[in-house]
Image (spheres, rainbow, N blue to C red):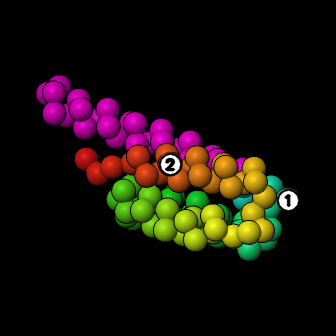
Amino acid sequence: MSTKTSTKTKKQLENDAKLAKATLSLQQIADSNITPRNIRKIVKDSVLMLQDAKQSLAVRAANAISLLDEVAQDPNMPSFARVTLWAAVSELESIREQ
């Protein structure tokens, strides 16, 4: 296997791991009963957006970040959810095109 192919595969695996970690964090917020319904809906929408394989991973991450940045400012968001959301957004921001 060439070095370029090896690097691309490694980067893809890293991005997949970051996506999985962010999705898991977001799912915890969406499944929490103390998270307000409107916030849960937006978080669930962002998870669905991340799972849409029709777009590149970087585009999906950017679109989800856009949705989540808006909801992160909501004063009704519980503090645990805000911290978890920021961690997920941080993971998504580190996903890059290859």
In depth, the one of 51 and 32 nearer the eye is 32
Mark 1 secondary-structure assignment: loop
Does the magenta-highlighted stretch encompass residue 6?
Answer: yes
Q: Position of residue 32 (x, y in %)?
A: 80, 55
> CA separation, marks 1 and 2?
23 Å
Is 52 positioned to the left or the right of 44 in the image? left
In the picture, the quarter occupied by the N terminus is top left
Residue at left offset 56%, top offset 42%: 21
Is 40 positioned to the left or the right of 20 in the image? right
In depth, the one of 92 and 53 nearer the eye is 92
Residue at left offset 54%, top offset 44%: 20
- Magenta residues span 1-28
Q: Position of residue 27 (x, y in %)?
A: 68, 53
Mark drawn on residue 34: 1
Return the disc, 1 or 2, that comes first in the chain's sequence: 1
Give above or below for 79 relative to 54: above
Amino acid residing under circle 2: Ser
Q: Position of residue 73 (x, y in %)?
A: 64, 68
Amino acid residing under circle 1: Ile
Badges 1 and 2: C-beta atoms under 8 Å apart?
Answer: no
- Tell me where residue 53 sits by quadrant: bottom left
Residue 52 makes an appearance in the image: no
- Residue placed furthest toward the right: 33
Does the magenta-highlighted stretch encompass residue 74?
Answer: no
Mark drawn on residue 90: 2
